[in-house]
Amino acid sequence: MASEEREVDLVVIGAGAVGENVADRAVKGGLETVIVERELVGGECSYWACMPSKALLRPVQVLGAARALPGVAEAVDGGLDVPAVLRRRDAITKGWSDDGQVSWLESADIDLVRGSAELSGEREVTVTAKDGSTTVLRARHAVALVTGSTPNLPDIPGLREAKPWTSRDATSAKSIPKSLAIIGGGVVAVEMATVFKALGAAVTMIARRGVLDVVEPFAAERVAGSLRSQGVEILTDTTTLRVERTEGDVLVETDNGTVATTELLVAAGRSPATAGLGLERIGLDPGKRLEVDDTLRVNGFDWLYAVGDVNGRALLTHQGKYQARAAGDVIAARAAGRPVDDAPWGAHVATADHDAVPQVIFTDPEIAAVGPTAEQARAQGRSIRVVDYDLGWVAGASVARDDFQGAARMIVDEDRGVMIGATFVGPDVAELVHAATTAIVGEVPIDRLWHAVPSYPTVSEIWLRLLEEYGRPS
């Protein structure tokens, strides 16, 4: 097959949301940039993760809110229209077409090369297209690896042969199975349990430990309790021993009994997608996370960057896009010989990855959190004070819905007098977390937060209540 060779300033491998942002910032910084993609431009988030999953979850949330509000509940007749929910999901993903994303690349002056990319030397990338033709791209300044992550498939006898679903299969499902078993107790597991139960499947979760171990226990317990009240069976502290797909069902044998299910979803975490990139040619281990400094440059290299899930710092789309802005800007600055602002919280670093990572889990109730949990903060050796408050006691909560139940936690670093963590659980709490993130990143003193007056009656009044519980400085 024919081969083409080309020299550019920057080669970005991976055209997901993070890769697009790296390329965009670099182009705006004056660099000629090529982005390489072997699947769909827009990546995992656009077609198989954030967007389709939230499109599926939103009708569940809206129906639940309507049923909880007198005067509206009486107007609700029946359950969700499953075909309509799936059609809206399809519309959100543009029918898994990336035409719109490709048009955006063109408008941003980012060139696209389709195919599988491998590092073939220092600052050199070889792209193999589906027809076997190759394009050799040589970067004058840098190569950025932005290939995301892939679902883990545990080494369980019979699991691969049973052809289980991954998160991609769940978010792109064309119909709802009669029953669904989920191996895992993390974010994907609880969100997909919420969706498929609401859409008519019988759901069983099989968690090796507990549910949502990464968040505050009080928040995880409320989500687990809600799922159980909706009819989801949750088996905790349960190990899956073997899996077998028969003609009619998938049999999941555990140390807590056997679960028979129509489909099986494996939601056991994700690993950096670094295999098949030719890393061994430059002395790096394929399949492992790439260690980077705060400017996202791979340790030991002055030309190689790893941005987003591949570096394992914070496997969240918004955090990857934050890293991308820093990486694209610093690549352009170094190429032009401009000063690099790499001090903590500088323009060219991803400082927030360490202590100010926000996350929302779109279950019913929602969980929104930022910063360390109380246990994590204590393990870090910090002197902290934990302040808890019942969200249902806030006036705005009673206005929002009659059955509003929730909780809030603020964690204060007593040595510095600033908030370092916050967790909210309850209906629609997602919109509370950015205020907490702003206060943490800005290191706003607690005594100054008293002057940030929340509007009444909104759920944001929780900030006043947390401060009152903490006590005003004398």
Image (spheres, rainbow, N blue to C red):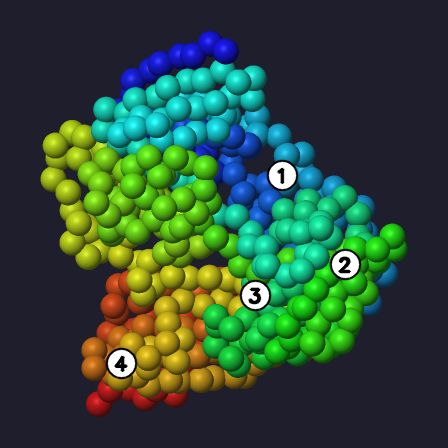
Q: Which residue is mark 1?
A: 93
Q: Secondary structure at mark 4?
A: loop
Q: Earlier in the sequence, mark 3 or mark 1?
A: 1
Can you say whether 116 is above or below 90 in the image? Answer: above
> Does the rendering let one see residue 110?
no
Q: CA distance from mark 3 to mark 1?
A: 24 Å
* Helix, strand or loop at mark 2: strand
The reply to whether dot 3 and dot 4 touch (C-beta < 8 Å) is no
Residue density around tag 4, few if under 14, some if 14–19, many if 20 or more, within 10 Å: few
Disc 3/disc 4 C-alpha distance (Å): 26 Å
Outermost residue toward the top? 2
Give how far apart the Cα atoms at labels 2 and 1 are. 32 Å
The residue identified by callout 3 is 186
Rendered image: mark on residue 244: 2
Residue at 22% x, 41% y is 301
Give the x, y percent position of residue 50.
56, 49
Q: Looking at numbered disc 1 in the image, what kind of residue is underneath it?
A: Thr
**Labels 4 and 2: the sequence-earlier one:** 2
